[in-house]
C-alpha cells in the first residue's frame, strides 16, 4: 500500500494550504469559510495534476490520504476508486451513497487559470476536480457533524469512456441492497448557483461507433474510376445527421456526431481507406435502437466498388432518476435555502454518464449544478471551459441537505 507523503512527494509537488483543517463548528447546510477554503485548495491542487482513465494513481492516493486523515476506514481498489462509510446518528435509517468521479480528459487546457494543468495533454475539462473536492469537504463536515443517515462517499475513476462505475460498484462498502444514491455534475454552461433536475431521463443513452471504408484508391484526376472513400465518408456523415434529425420528434431526441475522420496523406492520390468514429445519443431505448438500425441501413447500401463496415461499441445506459428519490431531494431543497435555485430541465441532457449503473442498483438522482464562470461560457469538455468554484458550495449544500433528511419508507 503506497499512501501518504512518500508517494505524494515522489510524484506531486505539495501545494500550499493543503493542511487547512475542516472547522469543527455546529452543523450547517452551507459550507462554512473553512470548508470552502479546504474545497478550493483541493480543487486547485487536483486540477493541476489531472489523470485520465481508470488508473489514477496520484489522484487515488490524494483522496485516500485525505479520508484517512479524517479518521475514516478507507476502502481503496486499484482502477476502481476509493470509498468510505461515515456513521449517521440513526442506524435504522436507510444509508445514502454519494458519488464523485475522478478522471480528467485528454484535452490540452486553455482556460488561462493560474492553477492550470501541469500534465501535458490532460485537463479537468469536465469539472470532476470540483466533484472530488466537494466530496472531501463534505466528508470532513460529516465526520465533525454526523448526519442522520449513514453516508457512503464514493470516488470513482474512468467515468468518461472506461465504464469505471462497474468495477467501483464491487466495493465492499457498496454491497448493500437498501440505499438511496445521489450525485451532482457541474455544468460550465448553466447559471451559477442553480440546481437543474429532471424527472425520468436526465441524461441520454449513448454508444460509440466506427465506420471503416475500403476502396482501391487511385489517381486524383480520375475519381470516377475508383470512387473516393472521403466522399463516401462525408455522405455517411450527412446521412447520419439526417437519420438522427428524423428521429428527434415528439419530445424525443437523437444525435449522431462524427468526432474523428481519417483518410489520405497527399494532394494527388485518392486514398484507399477512410475511418470515421463518433458517438450516437438517444433519449430513450427505442430511439436508440432505431438510430442504430438507421445507421446500419446507410452503411449496408451498395457503394459500388467500396465496402463499408460499421461497428457499434456499447456505451452507457441513460441516467434515469427515481421519481420518489428525486422528489425527496427537491422537497428538502425547497424547504431549505435552495428553493430559488431549482430549475426543471425541459429536455434531457444529451451527455452520457456511467452513474447510470448506480441508478440501476439503487433509487436516486443526479442533478446539474450550474458553474458558469463567464458571459459566453464554453461547455464541459472544451479546452477553455471554466468552472466557477462557488458551484462547490451549492453541490455541498445539495448533498448535506439530503443526508440530513429522514428517508421516506419504501414499500419494495
Ligand atoms: Zn465528461
Ligand atoms: Zn463528467
Image (tube, rainbow, N blue to C red):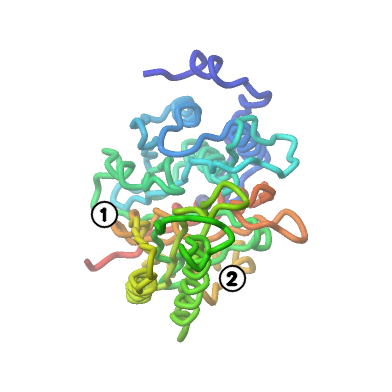
| Residue found 35% across the figure and 74% down from its top | 301
Label 1 with label 2: CB-CB less than 8 Å: no
Above or below: residue 355 compared with residue 300: above
Residue 179 placement, left or right of 139: left
Q: What residue does disc 2 label?
A: 343
> In which quarter of the view is residue 171 placed?
top left
Residue 331 visible in the current orientation: no
Name the image quarter holding the C terminus: bottom left
User: Is the CB–ligand 2 distance for label 1 below 8 Å?
Assistant: no
Above or below: residue 297 compared with residue 5: below
Front in this rendered view, residue 389 or 149 = 389
Residue 230 placement, left or right of 109: left
Q: Nearer the viewer, mark 1 or mark 2?
A: 2
First in sequence, mark 1 or 2: give its number.
1
* Residue farthest toward the right in the current orientation of the protein: 375
Front in this rendered view, residue 211 or 209 = 211
Above or below: residue 240 compared with residue 90: below
Amino acid at each position: 500500500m503506497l499512501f501518504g507523503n512518500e508517494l505524494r512527494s515522489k510524484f506531486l509537488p505539495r501545494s500550499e494550504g493543503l493542511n487547512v483543517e475542516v472547522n469543527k463548528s455546529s452543523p450547517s447546510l452551507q459550507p462554512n469559510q473553512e470548508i470552502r477554503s479546504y474545497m478550493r485548495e483541493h480543487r486547485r491542487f487536483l486540477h493541476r495534476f489531472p489523470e485520465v482513465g481508470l488508473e489514477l494513481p496520484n489522484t487515488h492516493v490524494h483522496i485516500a490520504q485525505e479520508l484517512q486523515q479524517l479518521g475514516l476506514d478507507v476502502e481503496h481498489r486499484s482502477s476502481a476508486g476509493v470509498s468510505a462509510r461515515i456513521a449517521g446518528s440513526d442506524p435504522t435509517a436507510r444509508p445514502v451513497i454519494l458519488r464523485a468521479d475522478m478522471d480528467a480528459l485528454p484535452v490540452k487546457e486553455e482556460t488561462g487559470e493560474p492553477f492550470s494543468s501541469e500534465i501535458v495533454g490532460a485537463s479537468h475539462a469536465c469539472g470532476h476536480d470540483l466533484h472530488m473536492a466537494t466530496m472531501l469537504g463534505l466528508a470532513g463536515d460529516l465526520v465533525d457533524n454526523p448526519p442522520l443517515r449513514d453516508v457512503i462517499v464514493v470516488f470513482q475513476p474512468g467515468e468518461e469512456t472506461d465504464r469505471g462505475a462497474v468495477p467501483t460498484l464491487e466495493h465492499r462498502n457498496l454491497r448493500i441492497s437498501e440505499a438511496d444514491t445521489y450525485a451532482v455534475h457541474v455544468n460550465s454552461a448553466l447559471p451559477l448557483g442553480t440546481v437543474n433536475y429532471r424527472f425520468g431521463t436526465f441524461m441520454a443513452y449513448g454508444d460509440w461507433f466506427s465506420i471503416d471504408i475500403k476502396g482501391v484508391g487511385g489517381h486524383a484526376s480520375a475519381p470516377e474510376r475508383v470512387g473516393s472513400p472521403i466522399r463516401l465518408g462525408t455522405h455517411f456523415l450527412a446521412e447520419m445527421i439526417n437519420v438522427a434529425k428524423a428521429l428527434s420528434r415528439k419530445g424525443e431526441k437523437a444525435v449522431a456526431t462524427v468526432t474523428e475522420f481519417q483518410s489520405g496523406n497527399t494532394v494527388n492520390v485518392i486514398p484507399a481507406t477512410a475511418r470515421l468514429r463518433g458517438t450516437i445519443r438517444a433519449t430513450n431505448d427505442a430511439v436508440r435502437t432505431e438510430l442504430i438500425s438507421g445507421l446500419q441501413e446507410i452503411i449496408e447500401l451498395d457503394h459500388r466498388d467500396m465496402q463499408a463496415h460499421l461497428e457499434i461499441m456499447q456505451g452507457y445506459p441513460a441516467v434515469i432518476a427515481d421519481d420518489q428519490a428525486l422528489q425527496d431531494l427537491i422537497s428538502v431543497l425547497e424547504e431549505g435555502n435552495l428553493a430559488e435555485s431549482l430549475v426543471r430541465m425541459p429536455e434531457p441532457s444529451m451527455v452520457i454518464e456511467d452513474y447510470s449503473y448506480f441508478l440501476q442498483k439503487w433509487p436516486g438522482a443526479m442533478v446539474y449544478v450550474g458553474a458558469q464562470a463567464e458571459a459566453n461560457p464554453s461547455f464541459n469538455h472544451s479546452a477553455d471551459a471554466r468552472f466557477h468554484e462557488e458551484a462547490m458550495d451549492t453541490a455541498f449544500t445539495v448533498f448535506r441537505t439530503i443526508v440530513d433528511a429522514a428517508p421516506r419508507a419504501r414499500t419494495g
